[in-house]
Image (cartoon, rainbow, N blue to C red):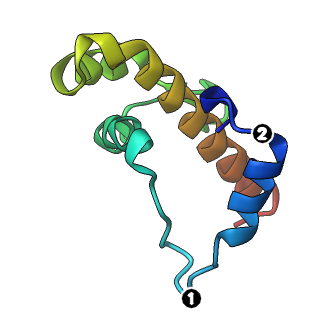
Amino acid sequence: MEACNATPEEIDAMVASIVPTQEEDSFEVFHDNWPAWEVFRRVSNQWRRNDFTGHKDSLDYTAVNSVIRLVVKKKDRLNTLDAVRLIEHGYLDVYRERINSGQ
């Protein structure tokens, strides 16, 4: 939302308005983020792994680039790539947290 010049007050209001669902696996994807979600979903099995631990380190950006070229308009590709990287970062945070907690 900061990228869209939203004020901190607007961001706080939006976060406060989000009502948790009963299902943990449910979430809302804003319209502007849908292309990035589609790219992430399509490459979600394309991970680079640590050679020693076997844990996921990052997405394979060769695959990400290929999918972006297939499904995203040229003028939107850079913003979509940035959004995919944010999704990846969030995913890896949760992934590492689960590994560290033994889940």
* Separation (CA) of disc 1 from disc 2: 30 Å
Q: Which residue is mark 1?
A: 22
Helix, strand or loop status at disc 2: loop
The one of 36 and 4 positioned closer to us in this rendering: 4
Q: Which residue is mark 2?
A: 7
At 39% from the left and 38% from the top, the residue drawn is 40
The one of 23 and 35 positioned closer to us in this rendering: 35
Name the quadrant containing residue 78: top left
Residue 88, image x and y in percent?
Answer: 56, 36
Q: Nearer the viewer, mark 1 or mark 2?
A: 2
Dot 1 amino acid type: Gln
Say if 17 sits above or below 97 in the image: below
At 36% from the left and 44% from the top, the residue drawn is 34
Name the quadrant containing residue 39: top left
The one of 85 and 28 positioned closer to us in this rendering: 28
At 28% from the left and 21% from the top, the residue drawn is 68
Badge 1 crowding class, 10 Å Cα cut-off, few under 14, some 14 to 19, many 20 or more, is: few
Helix, strand or loop status at disc 1: loop
Dot label at residue 69:
none
Inspect this view and state whether residue 87 appears: yes
CB atoms of marks 1 and 2 within 8 Å: no
Residue 55, image x and y in percent?
Answer: 61, 38
Say if 12 sits above or below 74 in the image: below
Quadrant including the C terminus: bottom right
Residue 71, image x and y in percent?
Answer: 19, 27
Dot 2 amino acid type: Thr
At 71% from the left and 44% from the top, the residue drawn is 93
Residue 1, image x and y in percent?
Answer: 64, 39
Inspect this view and state whether residue 48 appears: no
Say if 41 sits above or below 69 in the image: below
User: Does residue 35 appear left or right of residue 28 in this picture?
Assistant: left
